[in-house]
Amino acid sequence: MTVRPILIHPDPRLKKVCAPVGDISAELRKLADDMLQTMSEAPGIGRAAPQVGELKRLIVMDCVKDKDAAPQPMALFNPEVTWTSDEMNVYEEGCLSIPEQYADVDRPAEVEVRWLGIDGSEQSERFDGLWATCVQHEIDHLNGKLFIDHLTALKRQLITRKAVKRKRELQRAS
Ligand SMILES: [Zn+2]
């Protein structure tokens, strides 16, 4: 397994719109596997490829938080939201690319998503609860959008200022 370090905000690569993938090559399957593996060994329930510097439309997630429950790892290539509920939900979100910063974000409570699976087959599913929040947060990454972009400008600037400071500290430590 290749450990792929996570990019920390602010980073221009986190603001890019990612390109759709064509055929699911062995290289892309390896990337998805690496992302799932690193996710299972670290905090966080989702990862988007741009967070590891790969500007491709790929996200992985596993929102099973209960340690006794069976894991449900998923890799979604070219994920697309095809339907959103009118009902909204608010969750306190965080992001590995914005360490130690959390904020309440409003999103549709349910979404339907279409994507290509790791075997190249077209799949579609309706997500709710934490899964709905996670899949929308990760798809946002593919469009160069972070959870702080859903907040007021004031809150976003506050968090970004803290992130810049934190990033400097992390860089000094490494
Ligand atoms: Zn994130």
Image (cartoon, grey):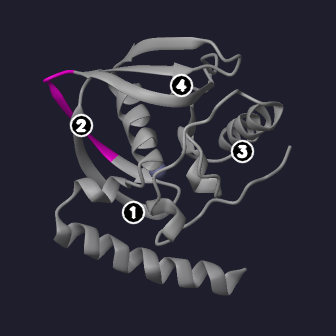
N-terminal-most mark, 1 or 4? 4
Assign a secondary structure to mark 4. Answer: loop
Label 4 packing within 10 angstroms: few (<14), some (14-19), many (20+): some
- Compare residues 101 and 15 and report the one nearer the observer: 15
Label 2 packing within 10 angstroms: few (<14), some (14-19), many (20+): many
Q: Residue at x 76, y 31 (%)?
A: 29
Farthest residue to the left: give it: 86
The response on whether ligand 1 sits within 8 Å of label 3 is: no
| Mark linked to residue 13 | none
Quarter residue 148 falls in: bottom left
Q: Which residue has dot 4 on it? A: 64
Query: In the rendered structure, are the residues bearing label 4 and label 3 in contact, judged by CB atoms less than 8 Å apart?
Result: no
- Compare residues 35 and 25 and report the one nearer the observer: 25
| Mark linked to residue 107 | 2
**Dividing the image into 4 quarters, which one contains the C terminus?**
bottom right
Query: In the rendered structure, are the residues bearing label 2 and label 4 in contact, judged by CB atoms less than 8 Å apart?
Result: no
Point out the frontmost of discs 4 and 3: 3
Q: Which residue has dot 1 on it? A: 101
**Dividing the image into 4 quarters, which one contains the N terminus?**
top right
Point out the frontmost of discs 2 and 1: 2
Q: Which residue has dot 3 on it? A: 38
Query: In the rendered structure, are the residues bearing label 2 and label 1 in contact, judged by CB atoms less than 8 Å apart?
Result: no
Query: Can residue 62 be seen here?
Result: no
Magenta part of the protein: which range?
A: 85-92
Assign a secondary structure to mark 1. Answer: strand
Label 1 packing within 10 angstroms: few (<14), some (14-19), many (20+): some
Farthest residue to the front: give it: 22
